[in-house]
Amino acid sequence: MPLTNPWLSEPTPVKRLDRERLEERLLNLLSSQNMCVLATTGPDGPLATPVRYFPLGFAVLFTAAPRSPKIRNIAADPRVSIGIFAPLVGLASSRGAQLFGTARVLAPEHPDRAHYWTAVRWENEHAERGRALSEPPEDTLVVVEAERIVYTEHWLRREGFAPRQFWRRSANDESRFIA
């Protein structure tokens, strides 16, 4: 039987991408998608919620109703995991990331909110709801700065790299991606 991608049946490489190349792939994934699955834990146990997000460097931003289950869970334990993936056709096209970080809930009056809010593309949702574009929303903003990321891309195997790569925030990452 002919194999579409014979390199998938070869031994899995273990070589790591250099940091710059890995970050380029991560930023591409974060910028090319807009849906994620947010995993939180609260008094009733784990909760996985599909969320529309906005990227800003290695931060994932989303709005949320103040009384939603995900906000209640974040209040109980701000440690979260976020899964982001590109549409999958087969193993060869498998590409996604698991982000781990601490969620910060920024109310409309929070001093850090303006910095992050510039990355939120609220106009589409406002138009869908029939709201005036001249009045920006005062929604609660949740910011998750990735502390570590597990990135999976099986196509990397073709170039001799491990399909699973690991990234950790370093001290100078903050100044490079957040103006």
Image (cartoon, rainbow, N blue to C red):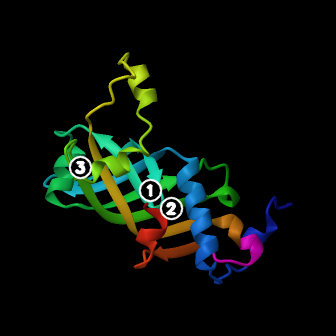
Q: Is residue 124 left or right of residue 163?
A: left
Q: Are marks 1 and 2 in contact (CB under 8 Å)?
A: yes
Q: Is residue 78 above or below residue 117?
A: below
Q: Nearer the viewer, residue 62 or 157?
A: 62
Residue under label 1: 83
Estimate the x, y position of residue 47 in percent, counting from the top left. 27, 51
- In reply to whether residue 161 is colored magenta, the answer given is yes
Q: Which residues are magenta?
A: 157-162
Give the mark nearest the N terminus, 3 or 2: 2
| Residue 54: image tag | none
- Indicate the secondary structure of the residue bearing disc 2: strand
Residue 163 appears in view = no
Please say if 130 is above or below 63. above
The quarter of the image holding the C terminus is bottom left
Q: Which mark is residue 97?
A: 2
Of labels 3 and 2, the one closer to you: 3
Q: Amino acid at mark 2?
A: Ala
Q: Please tell me which residue is depicted at 43% across the width and 21% down the height of the picture.
A: 127
